[in-house]
Image: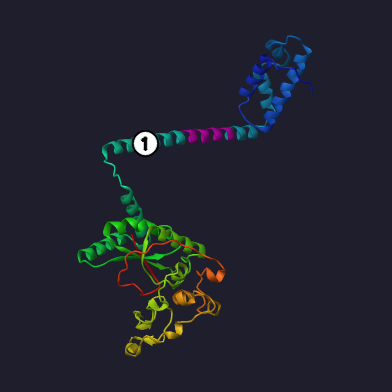
Amino acid sequence: MVKAKKMSNDIKKYIKYVKKIISIHSKDKKEFIQLLTQKIIEFSNEHDSCSYQDIVDEFGSPNEVAGSYIETLNSDEIIKKLNKKKIINIFISVIIILCISVWGFERYRINQLIDEAKHTKMKTYTAEEYKEKIAKEKQEKFRGEGAWDLAISAIEKCIDSQIDTSIACCMMNINVKDIIDFDNLLIKYGINLRINTYKPVNTSIYCLTYEEYWNGIKNILKRFKIVSCSEPILNAVLGIENNRYSCGCGKTSLRINPDGGVYPCVYWNKSEFTIKDLSLINENTFSKIDVIPNECKGCKYKDLCAGGCEGRRVYRDLHSADEYCPFVRGEKMEIEYQLGTKKDLVHSNYLCTLIVSM
């Protein structure tokens, strides 16, 4: 294939006219144009100062060249290719119309929002108000619409009645990072926060991992002061001299379910006693749940935790150490904490729980 050093403007002009006249698009057309261009370049190389008229004289006018190509196609093929082009053109037109419509609608909405903003007084929040707004949204997403306002109403009624009040929170993997955001409520109402660690009574999907549990505890104790702690494994880690049996499960407190069953702990999953046996139940009735795992018997902290929370262990293995125990893993854990004013609250030592305040 012979090529000119540079395609002249006259050659480009001629080829452009031929392409324009052959309005259909196909692989054959592309090959035809390439062949025609090659022939014209070869002719131009052989004739110095080749002009546009020289090309017409040699090959014919663009109309004639295009016509000769179209004559080689059968009518069905031409119709098919023309229809294809028509469909493509229609499609492109529709896309352009849609783009213009979308752009127009977006401009309309932007102008509408700007106009609304000019005539609407925007709500502004303090940091505390915004934190409470987010907490309310999360609470109602999980508990249902109106749950937050109902809880706040109950808090305010207790305060009006001069009742020392705590709000209860179940620490789970979906809220462990949010618990410290209760600080504004504790300050606002002068109340306490009671934190119970989630236990898999019905499902384990909300259970905390070992790392999540201790990261959560560390963050909580950075922000709050301890009022009461009957979470055995936490007492052991903190070195708080709090008798293991300060957790009153099965001793100073019982759980009576709607079915009449009597249980030592709100999380215990089985019992042989019913409400008919209440007169027979004493502090030793549920002593068999006080199991110290063999792996804990040589631990120097066993008197502080006695193997950890039985209500948590029973869902995995009552005879194994608490899943959140760092000592059985050979880990040393140090956590800074502050003790708040000790209060004789309703749920102090009621179950394995942590109560904090500001």
Residue 262 magenta = no
Residue drawn where x is 50% and y is 73% of the image: 322
Q: Is residue 267 left or right of residue 18?
A: left
Q: In this image, 254 relative to 45: left or right?
A: left
Range drawn in magenta: 84-96
Which residue reaches farthest left? Answer: 161
Residue 70's spot in the image, x, y percent?
66, 26
Number of marks: 1
Residue 138, image quadrant: bottom left
Residue 113, percent from left and from top:
33, 38
Q: Is residue 295 something that shows in the picture?
A: yes
- Residue sitting at x 54%, y 32%: 89
Residue depicted at x 52% and y 36%: 91
The answer to which quarter of the image holds residue 84 is: top right
Percent coordinates x, y for residue 58 in the rendering: 73, 14
Could you tell me residue 154's position as x and y percent?
25, 64
Element type where label 1 sits in the image: helix
Q: Which residue lies under the disc numbered 1?
A: 110
Q: Nearer the viewer, residue 140 or 334?
A: 334
93 in magenta: yes
73 vs 250: above or below: above
Q: Which residue ends up furthest to the bottom in the rendered image?
A: 280
Residue lying furthest top in this view? 49
| Amino acid tagged 1 | Ile
Q: Where is the N terminus found, in terms of image quarters?
A: top right
